[in-house]
Amino acid sequence: INREWHDGDELLLTLPMTAERSVCYHQAVCVKRGPLVFAYAPAFDALDDENNVTALQARAPFGVALCENAELETILTENSIELHTKGRVQQNWSMRAESCEQPPIAPETDSDVIDVRLVPYAKAQIRLSVFPVV
């Protein structure tokens, strides 16, 4: 922008970015908005062992499948961004050691519908970023 700038001048740049689902492994999806990949942010407990090493354990429900036609609502917070959508609890999808199992090929379709909060991958304490779709 070629112009004479003065103290207090501002330039506002608006880059329209919509949240989108990208198909990946086992017909599951990942959720992106611009350059950000989003992860599920389940409630969790921090567990300390005798050596003061902290491990994180997700509270139920850990595994969720995203509802196929549910809107991805963008929420701007004070210092970040979140996406909110609907999903179904996946009781048979859980952790394997410190990682989650592969997304189920046949996700549960008759389980409870819950509100799913997605945060930028780097802000998630427990990172689940590939979701089956129901």
Image: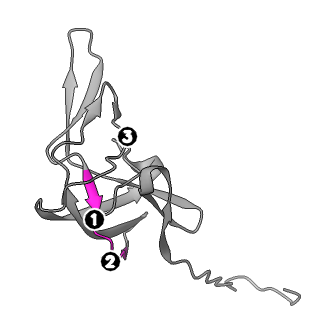
Q: Which residue is mark 3?
A: 102
In the displayed orientation, state which residue is furthest to the bottom.
3
| Residue 91 falls inside the magenta stretch | no
In the rendered structure, find residue 69 and report the number of the disc placed on it.
Answer: 2
Three-letter amino acid code of the residue under disc 3: Gln
Q: Looking at the picture, which amino acid does disc 2 mark?
A: Asn
Local packing at callout 1 (Cα closer than 10 Å; few below 14, some 14-19, many 20+) is: some
Q: Which residue is mark 1?
A: 134
- Where is residue 91? Give x, y as percent: 15, 46
- Residue farthest to the front? 106
Q: Is residue 71 left or right of residue 86?
A: right
Residue 90 is tagged as none
Element type at marker 2?
A: loop
Q: Which percent across, then down, holds residue 71? A: 33, 78
Q: Is residue 92 left or right of residue 79?
A: left
Residue 105 percent across, percent down from the top left: 34, 49
- Sequence-wise, the earlier of marks 2 and 3 is 2
Which one is in front, 97 or 43?
97
For the record, the magenta segment spans: 64-74
Q: Does the stretch in magenta take in 66?
A: yes
Colour pattern = one colour
**Label 1 near label 3: C-beta < 8 Å?**
no
Q: Measured along the vertical axis of the image, is residue 15 above or below residue 25?
A: below
Give how far apart the Cα atoms at labels 1 and 2 are. 9 Å
Image position, residue 51 (x, y; %): 27, 9
85, 50: nearer the viewer:
85
Left or right of 56 on screen, residue 32: right
